[in-house]
Image (tube, coloured by chain):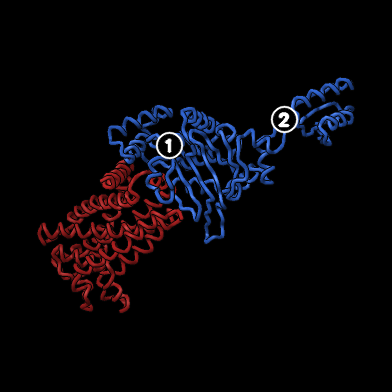
Amino acid sequence: MKTVIAENLVKTYDKGKVRALDGLNLDVEEGTVLSVLGPNGAGKTTVVRILTTLLRPDSGNAQVAGIDVVNNPEKVREVIGLSGQYAAVDEILTGYDNLVMFGELYHLGKKQAVVRANELLERFSLTEAAKRPIKTYSGGMRRRLDLAASLIVKPKVLFLDEPTTGLDPRGRQEMWGVIQELVKGGVTLLLTTQYLEEADQLADDIAVIDTGKVIARGTSDALKKQVGGERLEVVVEQQHVAKTMEIVSAVSGHKAGLDEGLRLITAPVSTGSVALFEVLKSLDSAGIHALDVGLKRPSLDDVFLALTGHTAEVKIEEKEVKK
Amino acid sequence: MRALNDIYIITRRQLLLLSRVPEVLIFSTIQPVMFVLLFRYVFGGSIDTGQPGGYVQLLMPGIFVQTVAFTLAGTASGLAEDMKKGLIDRFRSLPISQSALVIGRTLGDSLLNIVVLAVMGIAGYVVGWRPSSGIGNIALGFLFLLFFGYALSWVGVLVGLSASDARVVQNVSFIVTFPLTFLSNAFAPTTGMPRALQYFAEWNPVSTMVAACRELFGLENQFGATAGSFPSEHPLVTSLFYMVVIMVIFVPLSLRKYRNYAE
């Protein structure tokens, strides 16, 4: 069953001048994780805001757990959890105060709210910091508390908008651990990210978006395959380069490329380890000893580059420099 | 019922915030108390009111009104702060009454006003303010002040939700409230003002509020009854009218702005 469905969503800003979403389609199967992957400004946050009822689309349909987000936002709010780009908790209040307050706002009643707050603090390793104001927390701790706040009533669908943006590597690792635990527990999750590695680590399925549209959809493996099969890479000593290029080209059927500095010869192959074996056999009979040889699968970076004509990372850096 | 519960929880949050940052409460009371002392002793000596009890009798209602007028800035900057932190997104994604956050915020700010007015009243008493109208009228006077602050709080909601930055909110609120409180009869008679300003001052809600409070605290209002205009003759009715009009305009506008604030 599809727990999240978005059909043909369009959202413009600035009186139609900026098309944040340009006919976007998405769906998330119950109990799975979909990562919406794209550079800054691709429309990730806009999708999340529409699906969580914070924003109305100009046109198109969206349903969460079978409920229409435009016509029935109150009902949608009862079944979702949202954790945004910024830790949306009261800085001055303690972690405990925040969770109890949100619990009460979910109409748990004071007693239940206290029980649930303590459970969540325990689960996200925040018990020690529970009575400290949030402003004394590290970035990672804030995000965990924010995530805890979105799980007070076990949501049918959880939305995480760039859950690790701005965290240091350690904070990111911790956050991934926490999210992986959730995923094991069988939550339906839609997560946006600009980090390819994050999508690879956490998601069952990836939707690559750029300029407000989904430009590719599939598992990480399928996307990589879509870009092309594997690449064969061989490094040999200088005097063998020419001969090796001949061999590799012959096996691949494509003209092999050469990185002269590294003496690295590469060529696309479609038969994987069979091709590798053939190359090794030919090199051996030519008396050439390979210094390094291997099959490389394309990274998600390659995927992104191939799909959009630009890499995700470069765009992010530009954005950060501007800030 | 659920909506009431939501409003109650948000209002309580406001008070919890105040208890965690007592500086806010301290500075919101120190400033008006400082004004009481400054005006009482700096201007009090040179303004002859011909009023038994002297300038401080006329001054106190003026400072009360000025103080509650600044509720506008408090509400506005509080909301702008919440927006900046993404907190409003969180609240709006919860299955709670969508107006609870703003209503709770305005109520919380009014509760703060009760404390501030009480402290100011005591400070005024210490420096010679003696309302002479009996307990019922005095209470009514304070009720009027609270309601005025509450109405302006709703203007603050709109300002806070419309501005892009908490600092802008502070400045905008200040630019709006400061002239309004001084182009009035609050601190000096309007008779000395240029004619055009006199008219403005007569109809200024701050003036009608000050005049209304002076009446309720047992004073004859002599600051500003220059033109014999309707607002200066009937300050209570005019003030009540202003408050209702402000609420009727700004409550729906603010709530709509809140519901659509991301658009």
Amino acid identity at mark 2: Lys
Give the mark nearest the N terminus, 1 or 2: 1
> Picture coordinates of residue A174 (x, y %)?
51, 30
Chain A rendered in what hue?
Answer: blue
> Looking at the rendering, which quadrant does residue A295 occupy?
top right
Query: Quick check: B84 left or right of A282?
Result: left
- Residue at mark 1: chain: A
Query: Quick check: B84 left or right of A273?
Result: left
Circle 2 — which element? strand
From mark 1 to mark 2, how far is it between C-alphas? 39 Å
Q: Residue furthest left?
A: B134
> Picture coordinates of residue A128 (x, y %)?
39, 27
Residue A147: which disc? Answer: none
Residue A156: which disc? Answer: 1
Amino acid identity at mark 1: Lys
- Residue at mark 2: chain: A
